[in-house]
Each structure stands twice: as structure tokens, then as C-alpha cells.
Amino acid sequence: MNNSLLPSWLSGHMFTYRPDNVSPEVIADIRARLSKFRAEDPEISIVIPAYNEEKGLLNMLSSLGDQKTSRRIELLVVNNNSADRTQELLDQCGVRSIFEKQPGVAYARQSGLLAAKGRIIANADSDCLYPAGWVDAITAPLQNPAIACSYGLYSFLPSPHSSRLALAMYEKAAHLLNRVRNRHRSYMNVYGFNFAFRRADALAVGGFETDSGREGSVAELIAAGEPPPPSGRCEDGLMALALQNQGKGSTFRVTDPNARAWTSDRRLVAEGSLLKAFTSRFWGGIQEIGLFLSPTQKTPS
């Protein structure tokens, strides 16, 4: 991996560890830095689903531990029936967690929504790293009552099977399509690992629909030629659509670099190659270009 192409702040969180034998110093450091996220009356709840995330969980927690904010915040992780050491690591780091036995990210996010105490929910994922200004940047637009959902952009962390340069080229193409969709279909750009909304609004529209049936965003479903679930809501983008359609406000694209999440490339690598991933998404986007540019509010089917 060529770390020279990565922001310098990432290096402090890309350490390796054995989940069954983590250095006590590493645990103590993360636990101390996360202690600020134990507010009893939080303004913001950072809610994170976790399923068998022992290999990267501490890296994500380390990045959150460096958040620079004056807001009262709680950190809540939903253990989605993990069979590895996820819960053990959460306990060692002093992280508040709840258990959701029903498998599926939508169930985990819904449980987190119900258990959270904050007025605002900032959604994150266990395989991502977040810059120090993330929580403030992703939630700042919600100070405007006309905005119901805010979302940030993303970059991929290179694995041994990919290069940062190739990933950056993929991202530029993906974010160009993002800008096109943002004209009339901004909800399609919302990813579960990087968006925020008011808890009361989400509860008022019924929360996360648990029939979404899979991980992924609306954009991912469309690119794969798959329809949204029968309810018309997924665990991320179609939540934004529900908020919009039920009069809670618009969806806002946050371009502040502090709102950019760095996420694993594991889904891209799983498709076999970056070229294959890019091709499937590119042609999916081209086929839906009329939908993206049309102002008619209709859920894709």
C-alpha cells in the first residue's frame, strides 16, 4: 500500500492488531479518547451497526476517538449477532452497545435509532475511518430546519488487491454521477456509513424499514438492476426519501472534506476487479440518466 497518497491523519488509525491479543496500551488509549462520548443527555448520537467486525473495529474507534467537537455526544454500537470478538472489544474500550439478534443492517440501524438518546443521529459504519471534524461537519446542516437529512462523500482505503490511484479515479467518476443525481434524486447518493438526520423525524416516518433485505444503498441497488424493497425504503437513501416525501425537509450534500468518510474497498474487491465494479455502476448510471435528470418524484422500481 502506498500511504503517500493518503491524508496524513489516516496513518495513526491504520495499525494492525490481533483481536485475540490486543496490546493493553492500545485498548487503554482508545478507551481514554472515547470517554468524551458518554454524555447522559447527548445532543448527537453516533450510531454504528457491527457484524463480525473484530478485524477493523479498533481502527474505526480510534478515528472517532480523535473527534474535535464541543457537542455532547454518545457513541452507540449495535452488535448485530456477531460471532467473533466484536463484543469483547467493545467492552474493553468502554463503548455503550446493545445487541440485535435479527440479522440485517436495517434491523441494527432501527434498534440503534430506538435506543439512541440524542436529538440528532449521525450514522457511521465499523469498516470506516472518520476525520477529526466529521461529527460536526455531517450534522451542521441540520441546524437549518428546512434540511432533514445530510450526507457526506467517501473515499476508499486501498487493500493489498487495489491501488489508491485506481480507487481515486473510480471515486472521481462516481462522484460525477453523484452530482448528476443530486439535482433531483439526492436520496440516491446517501450511504449508511455517512449520513445524519433528526431522531424525531426518523421516528415520525416509521424509522428504518426492516424489509430492505440487504446491505447497500439505493444507488447500489439501481446500479445492480435491482428494485428497492416493497416499502420503498432502504436502510439509508430511501430513509432520506421518506423524510423528504413526508415533509420533514430536503436532503443536503455536504462537501466539506471533514465530512468525507474513508471506507473499506471490500465490496469493490468482492466484484473481482475495480474495472468490473466501475463498468457495472457506470452502465447502471447511464441507463438511469433520464430518471436522475427528471424532477418527477417517483421511487425507482
Image (tube, grey):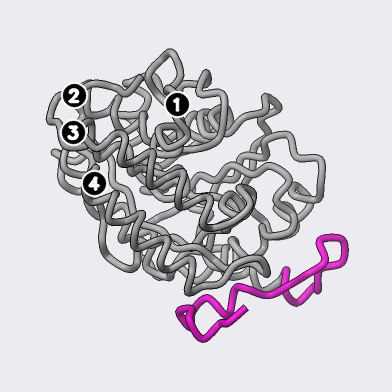
Under circle 1, the secondary element is: loop
Nearest the eye: 232 or 250: 232
Q: Residue at x 48, y 81 (%)?
A: 5
- Residue under label 1: 208
Quarter of the image that includes the C terminus = top left
Disc sitting over residue 142 in the figure: 4
Disc 2 crowd, CA 10 A, few/some/many (<14, 14-19, 20+): few
Q: Nearer the viewer, residue 48 or 10?
A: 10
Task: Name the spot of residue 101 as percent of width and height, x first.
Answer: 71, 27
Query: First in sequence: mark 4 or mark 3?
Result: 4
Q: Amino acid at mark 2?
A: Gln
SS type, badge 2: loop
- Label located before the other in sequence (3 or 1): 1
Whether residue 41 appears in this view of the structure is no
Q: What is the distance, in whole Å, between disc 2 and disc 3 at their CAs? A: 14 Å
In front: label 2 or label 3: 2
Earlier-in-chain disc, 2 versus 1: 1
Query: Disc 2 designates what residue?
Result: 297
Residue at the image point whose x is 47% and y is 74% from the top: 165
**Residue 132 visible within the image:** yes
In front of the other: label 2 or label 1? 2
Comparing marks 2 and 4, which lies closer to the viewer? 2
Residue placed furthest toward the top:
230
Q: Which amino acid, mark 3?
A: Gly
Which residue is disc 3 drawn over?
249
Disc 1 residue type?
Phe
